[in-house]
Amino acid sequence: MAHPIHTQEARQRGWRSLIWPGVFTLAALPILIGLGVWQVERLAWKNSLIAAINEGLGKARAPLEEPADAWKDLAAKEYRPVSVVGRFRHEDERFLFATHGSEMGWHVYTPLETAGGKLLFVNRGFVPDQLKDASSRAAGQIEGEVRVQGLVRKPGVEGWFDAPSDAAHKTFYWRDLGGMTALLASEQDRARVLPFFVDAAAEPANPGGWPKGGVTRLDIPNRHLEYALTWFGLAVTLVAVFGAFTWTRLRPESD
């Protein structure tokens, strides 16, 4: 039979051995649960986004300025197909860093002077880095009145790891409508800018093939449920492992 004093000392050693594992478990558990909850929230957001894309793509193109203030309703309808008539101001091109397949380059954002007197930044599409300079793709710098067809896109939100904009070279690393607008020379022009972008469709293609339109990403992956279950599973596993470890440290000694 185990001596009472020895049994008490063993239990004390067992409890002491649980201090740091217990601290780790208490610190890690809310983090794992929080990450799981965050992924559940992301799942709801992603489902809503995919539903909005599908709803928008299922509708006919809406004239952006018929009636003149039709754009006010369209501003809140991301991915809504639209059409608008105007003239490009190629001298005010902006560039957003992007990739196309495995190639790095830029999305070309050009203000369109609309028939209704507004300025609309149009994402005309992708160009590789060697074609960033407009003179290298002169055929695509369309003059005169054009009809642009595309999808309404909201301005982006700056991420923690996005590189800072380079105003001197008109380059951006997130869909910064405010930053693009601020580079316009006159206050009158800045006041006329519509509060959203339009991503131009792939067809009709630009002369010379550049910029290459149709760059809106529509095949959006949705694995947030899988990620949430992973984090919650890790939380359950952590509790189970700590429980088993505690049992081995505190279980009564055999006679």
Image (spheres, rainbow, N blue to C red):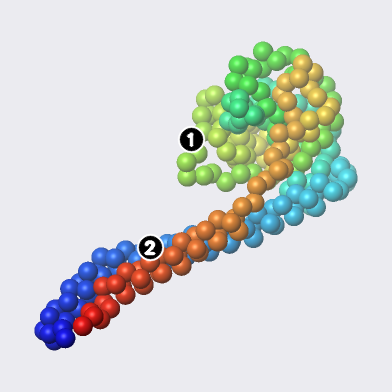
Please identify the quarter of the rendering in which residue 109 is found. Answer: top right
How many C-alpha atoms fall within 10 Å of the one at disc 1: few (<14), some, or many (≥20)?
A: few
Dot 1 falls on a residue whose secondary structure is: loop
Q: Residue at x 69, y 53 (%)?
A: 49
Is 55 placed above or below 171 here?
Answer: below
Q: Is residue 23 above or below residue 109?
A: below
Which numbered disc flags the more N-terminal residue, 2 or 1?
A: 2
- Return the x and y of residue 31 as percentages of the image width and height: 42, 62
The residue that disc 2 covers is 28
Q: Nearer the viewer, residue 244 or 134?
A: 244
Q: Is residue 186 left or right of residue 5?
A: right
Q: Which residue is mark 1?
A: 164
**In x, y percent, where is residue 14?**
22, 74
- Judging depth in this view, the residue of 76 and 228 nearest the camera is 228
Q: Is residue 251 visible?
A: yes
- SS state under label 2: helix
In the image, what residue occupies the spot 80% across and 24% down?
A: 205
Q: Nearer the viewer, mark 2 or mark 1?
A: 2
How crowded pointer 2 is (Cα within 10 Å; few <14, some 14-19, many 20+) is rated as some
Quarter containing the N terminus: bottom left
Q: Is residue 15 left or right of residue 197?
A: left
- Would residue 15 appear left or right of 218 to someone viewing this image? left
In the rendered image, residue 131, in percent from the top left (x then y), is placed at 64, 17
For residue 242, which quarter of the picture?
bottom left
- Image marks 2 and 1: residues in contact by CB distance under 8 Å: no
Q: What amino acid is found at the position of numbered circle 2 in the picture?
A: Ala
Coordinates of residue 13 in the picture (x, y in percent): 17, 73
Comparing 233 with 179, the one in front is 233
